Image (cartoon, rainbow, N blue to C red):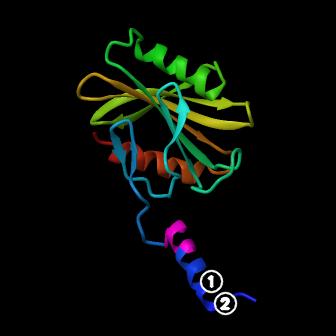
Amino acid sequence: MIRRPCLALLATVLASVVVAPGARAADLTLHGLKAAPPIPFSAPEEAGLDALRVVHPADAKAGGEKLSLTAVAFPKDSGMSDAELLDYVKTTFLATSAAGKPVERNLLGRKVTGQALEKKIPAPSLAEVYVATKKGGEKVVLAFVLAPGFSEEAEAAIAAIAATLRE
């Protein structure tokens, strides 16, 4: 039998995890960049090599995420072109070297060309990768990975993140 205080605690916990219709998800902050996604993401976790990763749903177990965002920071003097940064992140963090189709988004007030591609490892998925250049010249590569069947919701989330991205 569940006692009423336990039910109240459970309701409080669930209310903090679920975003009510009309409520706004918490802002994302990754490597000094902030964005306002329309869906909730997990807290940022270290993904190695100056990378942070967030997932949706926020409580998804590994492999169960519908959308993930990996943000990889690079110093101004990394010595790599934007194309090289994209290739590095695709290979190192997305486990693919597939050539992507060019896609454009506005990031930090600038139109940037990224890549859209299909991934096979660890499971079939779609990805979009972009380079965001900060005011000081530092770069953050944003790699979105979405599960098949979540394309419409993911597009809305990626568009909102891109539109609200700021330093």
Residue 35 in magenta?
A: no
Q: Residue at x 47, y 18 (%)?
A: 85
Which mark is drawn over residue 3? 2
- Disc 2: CA contacts within 10 A as few (<14), some (14-19) or many (>=20): few
Q: Residue at x 41, y 17 (%)?
A: 82
Q: Is residue 17 inside the magenta stretch?
A: yes
**Residue 8 vs residue 25: left or right?**
right
Kind of residue at badge 1: Cys
Q: What is the three-letter code of the residue carrying label 2?
A: Arg
From the top left corner, tell me how far across and down residue 65 is, in percent: 65, 49
Judging by the rendered image, the residue that carries numbered circle 1 is 6
Element on which disc 1 rests: helix
Q: Residue furthest top?
A: 79
Q: Quadrant of residue 11?
A: bottom right
Question: Is 124 or 56 nearer to us in this picture?
Answer: 56
Q: Where 28 sits versus 18, above or below?
A: above
The quarter in which the N terminus is drawn is bottom right
Q: Quadrant of the C terminus?
A: top left
Task: From this view, report whether residue 159 is shown above or below residue 141.
Answer: below
The residue sitting at the left extreme is 135
* 13 left or right, relative to 83: right
Quarter assignment of residue 5: bottom right
Find numbered disc 2 in the image and state the secondary structure of the residue it sits on: loop
Relative side of 134 to 12, left or right: left
Q: Are marks 1 and 2 in contact (CB under 8 Å)?
A: yes
Q: Residues within 10 Å of mark 1 (few under 14, many from 20)?
A: few
Please report the bounds of the magenta region as a residue range.
Answer: 13-20
Q: Is residue 126 above or below residue 77?
A: below
